Amino acid sequence: MTTSGSSIEGGGPRLTVTPPSSVVFSSETGAVVGCVAEGSPLPTISWITREGSPLPRQTAFTDILANGSLVLRPFPPERYRADVHAVSVRCRASNSQGVVVSPPVSLQAVVWQDFNVRAEGGQTVLGGSVLLRCLIPSHMSKVVKPTAWEMPTYTIYPTFMPEGRYIMMGNTGDLLIRGVTLDDAVTEFRCRVRDLLNGGREITSRDPAKIQIIEKSETSRPAIVNKQRSVTVAEGSTLVLPCIATGQPTPTVRYVMQ
């Protein structure tokens, strides 16, 4: 958390702990969002909507504690409300000397549902490359992340430094296999994911991904197998962009900035 706000002469309020810009929480667990301010006299902390309307101190879904924390209560799936569980709010601290307001805080409840993770295979020529995908239902993609690919003899973990034939993409969770062999074609690959909100439990795909080896043709035009129009990545993190192409002879791959 970072410090935000400005002090005012005469003891005006100043936020010493600001809430995070985004809070994603499970409907089963709820969440508590903290906000702390100092000043003289001691500021009163309240919460307001993005438009400035005050939040009630207590509702069926929320509480504002004496210390200023906003409590988001657990709730059953049928009681989900977009105007409560998918909104932006601000922390407001005020005393007789002035008012300070935090940046917007995005609240996003995730309604827990049972789900299955699916490992998707692919096809390539002998010695070629193939991308196996770890598919998570879209409604769980914010809170469920791929952690590993399991093979009968060992486990592959994410990396941003490609080496060897098996590379799990750290930003997507997909598995890139280079120089595919006949052994790869009879190996079962299973994707493992972690639920970040509900105790960090891990789930492995029930059905394995498999690789199909196809015959080489005499000549064929190059074709890009994996196509991504856009990729989202956090500022300062590392991004790996695989480019898998088929064709005969084997195509040469290069990137062009536009």
Image: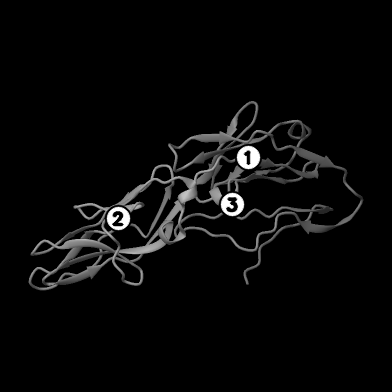
Marks 2 and 3, how far apart at CA: 28 Å
Callout in the foreground (1, 3): 3
Picture coordinates of residue 20, whole percent (x, y): 34, 57
Q: Which mark is residue 101?
A: none
Q: Calculate the distance from the C-alpha at mark 1 to the C-alpha at mark 3.
A: 31 Å
* Quadrant placement of the N terminus: bottom left
Kindly check if marks 2 and 3 are in contact, taking CB atoms under 8 A apart as contact. no
Q: Name the side, left or right, on which 85 lies relative to 113.
A: left
Look at 50% across and 44% down and name the residue there: 112
Q: Residue furthest right?
A: 218
Judged from this view, the residue extending furthest toward the top is: 153
Q: Position of residue 106 (x, y in %)?
A: 40, 60
Which of the marked residues, 2 or 3, is nearer the chain's N terminus? 2
Which residue is disc 3 drawn over? 138
Point out the tag, 2 or 1, that comes first from the N-terminus: 2
- If you read the primary sequence from the N terminus, does the residue marked by circle 1 or circle 3 appear first? 3
Mark 3: give few (<14), some (14-19) or many (20+) Cα within 10 Å.
few
Q: Which mark is residue 164?
A: 1
Say which residue appears at 14% left-offset and 63% top-offset. Answer: 43
Q: Secondary structure at mark 1?
A: loop
Q: Amino acid at mark 2?
A: Met
The answer to whether any part of residue 1 appears in the image is yes
Expressed as whole percent of the image width and height from the top left, the position of residue 258 reads: 63, 72
**Tally of numbered tags:** 3
Name the residue carrying label 2: 1
Amino acid type assigned to the residue bearing label 3 in the image: Ser
